[in-house]
Image: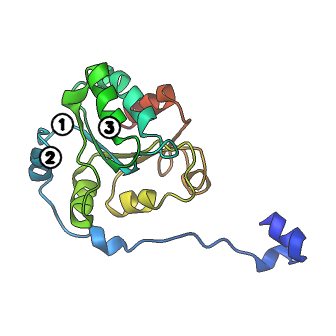
């Protein structure tokens, strides 16, 4: 904002940030959370943590995988759904096996919009472990579904997520991610 003001000699009172938005009505209505979880072989009352995004270094799903053992140490009934496709997808599944957590992580890949909406409605927490997140539309979608968010302080979400107000802010490392998830459960 200040850069624009200096570059164009525009007074501060003429500049206002208008953030992105989503159609929150997409997430209206009831869903049988137990039935949705059952499709992923998750118990109806077991906590389900959702990651949705590209399987790339930028989005940080590898950091989430590394955090899962620490989350399970405190919340042994937790399950994770990593709905992601991309260059890291196979490595994520391999690493989950190597860590011995493959029975707690589901990898449905890229899901259709209707399934994404149902996952948002049925999950208990949405995690955005990005190393760099330009804006974070998924945060707005999670809030539209009434879900708590755990987000890194890298990029867009840092501007509009208030730590312990409307979400939990974390650093982009597995210790901080596990702390944030355990704090939210």
- Look at mark 1 in the image and give the residue it sits on: 46
Q: Earlier in the sequence, mark 3 or mark 2?
A: 2
- Look at mark 3 in the image and give the residue it sits on: 90
Is the residue 2 above or below the residue 55 in the image?
below
Q: Residue 172: x and y, percent?
A: 54, 36
Query: Image quarter for residue 115?
Result: bottom left
Q: Badge 2: how crowded within 10 Å, few (<14), some, or many (20+)?
A: many
Q: Residue 50: x and y, percent?
A: 31, 46
Foreground pick, 172 / 110: 110
Query: Image quarter for residue 76?
Result: top left
Q: Earlier in the sequence, mark 3 or mark 1?
A: 1
Q: Which mark is residue 101?
A: none
Q: Is residue 95 visible?
A: yes
Secondary structure of the residue carrying numbered label 1: loop
Q: Which mark is residue 37?
A: 2
Q: Residue 27: x and y, percent?
A: 28, 67
Whole-Å distance between the Cαs marked 3 and 2? 23 Å
């Amino acid at each position: 904002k200040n850069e624009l003001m200096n570059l164009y000699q525009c007074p501060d009172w003429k500049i206002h940030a208008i953030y992105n938005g989503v159609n929150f009505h997409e997430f209206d209505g009831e869903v049988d959370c137990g039935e949705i979880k059952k499709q992923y072989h998750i118990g109806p009352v077991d906590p389900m943590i959702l990651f949705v995004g590209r399987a790339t270094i930028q989005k940080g799903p590898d950091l989430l995988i590394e955090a899962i053992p620490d989350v399970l140490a405190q919340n042994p009934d937790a399950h994770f759904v990593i709905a992601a496709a991309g260059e890291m997808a196979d490595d994520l599944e391999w690493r989950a096996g190597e860590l011995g957590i493959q029975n707690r992580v589901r990898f449905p890949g890229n899901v259709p919009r209707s399934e994404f909406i149902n996952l948002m409605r049925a999950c208990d927490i949405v995690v955005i472990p990005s190393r760099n997140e330009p804006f974070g539309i998924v945060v707005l979608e999670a809030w539209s579904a009434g879900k708590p968010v755990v987000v890194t302080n890298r990029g867009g979400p840092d501007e509009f997520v208030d730590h312990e107000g409307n979400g939990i802010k974390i650093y982009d490392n597995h210790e901080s991610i596990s702390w944030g998830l355990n704090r939210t459960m």
